[in-house]
Image (cartoon, rainbow, N blue to C red):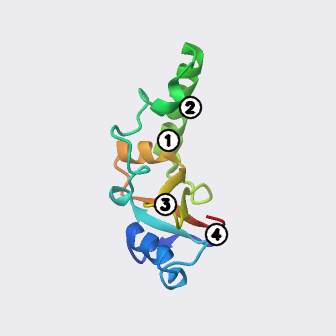
Amino acid sequence: MNSPKKCPTTIEAIFEAWRSKSRGELIEEGRVYLVPTNEIVDNGYRKLPRTEENALAPDKIKNKSPQDMEAGKANYREIRESIREQGFDPLRPLTFLIRKNWQKIRLHQGHHRLGVAEELGVSEVPVLFLYDRKH
């Protein structure tokens, strides 16, 4: 995998290019880009930043046992300590899925890592953009 390079444009511009079919002009699919953390919105609906206390998304909490809740918090703590000690692993970028019929670009994988980045004040994170050509 190539080392991450600075994203040449905004996430919204990438999404708009995909919707208008000029997608190849802005980014190279499959390449990891460094994106400013403050530009990333976790699916546009999350009101609270992901933290240890709300490690599981509200829609995932239903019927969860206290053990499951604690496991989610422990997982978040492990991710936080790993990123604090070693930084972001460019081989595990946040993944955005882009579908033409969506109104916004969506964070597909990396919700906890994004929350940790915000918590630790990380200015840029590695991001991979994937285009869903079926939808």
Vertical relation: 37 (above or below) 6: above
Q: Is 128 placed left or right of 51 in the picture? A: right
Q: Are marks 2 and 1 in contact (CB under 8 Å)?
A: yes
Q: In which quarter of the view is residue 52 placed?
A: top left
Instruction: Indicate the amino acid at tag 1.
Output: His
Q: Residues within 10 Å of mark 1 (few under 14, many from 20)?
A: many
Q: Earlier in the sequence, mark 3 or mark 4?
A: 3
Q: Are marks 4 and 2 in contact (CB under 8 Å)?
A: no
Give the x, y percent position of residue 46. Answer: 38, 42
Q: What residue do we see at 33% from left, 40% from top?
A: 47
Q: What residue do we see at 38% from left, 51% from top?
A: 44
Q: Who is closer to the viewer here, 118 or 58?
A: 58
Disc 2 is placed on an element classified as: helix
- Residue 102 got which mark? 3
Disc 1 is placed on an element classified as: helix
- Residue holding disc 1: 112
Whole-number angstrom distance, CA of label 4 to CA of label 2:
33 Å
Instruction: Indicate the amino acid at tag 4.
Output: Arg
Whole-number angstrom distance, CA of label 3 to CA of label 2:
30 Å
Q: What residue do we see at 53% from left, 30% from top?
A: 60
Q: Earlier in the sequence, mark 3 or mark 2?
A: 2
Disc 3 is placed on an element classified as: loop
- Residue holding disc 2: 75
Q: Is 118 placed left or right of 128 in the picture? A: left
- Residue holding disc 4: 133
Between tags 3 and 1, which lies in front? 3
Q: Is residue 43 visible?
A: yes
Q: Residues within 10 Å of mark 3 (few under 14, many from 20)?
A: few
Q: Residues within 10 Å of mark 2 (few under 14, many from 20)?
A: some
Whole-number angstrom distance, CA of label 3 to CA of label 1:
23 Å
